[in-house]
Amino acid sequence: MRRYAHKLELFSMWVMVFGVVALCQPWSLLLHRYGATVIFGGLILFNIFSRFKPPPPKRPQRAGASTSD
């Protein structure tokens, strides 16, 4: 899950943006009706996924270095 934390955080931000667009558009009553719910769902996802820290980057081993210290 930590590997995908950044991507899921970005996805949740795009869900919130879609909710704002759905709330402000005048063509579809269905999108307008559920726009605030979509924003709220994206906010919950963002709060969950923003708490995951990405895994530490792997450091390359030096040539000739032993693995047991």
Image (cartoon, grey):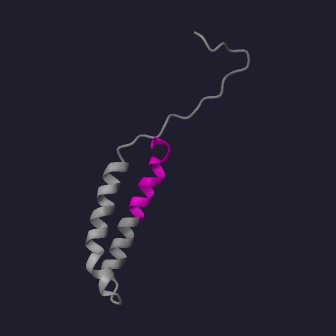
Which residue ends up furthest to the right in the rendered image? 63
Q: Nearer the viewer, residue 31 or 65?
A: 31
Q: Which of 69 and 29 is in front in this view?
A: 29
* Above-or-below relation of 6 to 15: above
Which residue ends up furthest to the top in the rendered image? 69
Left or right: residue 5 versus residue 63 is: left
Instruction: Residue at 48% x, 53% y: name it.
Output: 7
Which residue ends up furthest to the bottom in the rendered image? 27
Q: Nearer the viewer, residue 68 or 62?
A: 68
Is the C terminus in the top left, top right, bottom left or bottom right quadrant? top right
Does the magenta segment cover residue 67? no
Is the N terminus in the top left, top right, bottom left or bottom right quadrant? top left
* Above-or-below relation of 7 to 34: above
Does the magenta segment cover residue 9? yes
Instruction: Residue at 46% x, 40% y: name it.
Output: 54
Magenta region, residue range: 1-14
* Above-or-below relation of 33 to 26: above
Count of numbered labels shown in the rendering: 0
Q: Is the magenta stretch mostly helix, strand or loop?
A: helix
Coordinates of residue 36 in the picture (x, y in percent): 26, 72
Left or right: residue 65 versus residue 21 is: right
Instruction: Residue at 30% x, 62% y: name it.
Output: 41
* Above-or-below relation of 68 to 63: above
Left or right: residue 36 versus residue 22 is: left
- Residue 39, image quadrant: bottom left
Coordinates of residue 10 in the picture (x, y in percent): 44, 57
Coordinates of residue 62 in the picture (x, y in percent): 69, 21
Instruction: Residue at 50% x, 43% y: name it.
Output: 3
- Residue 59, image quadrant: top right
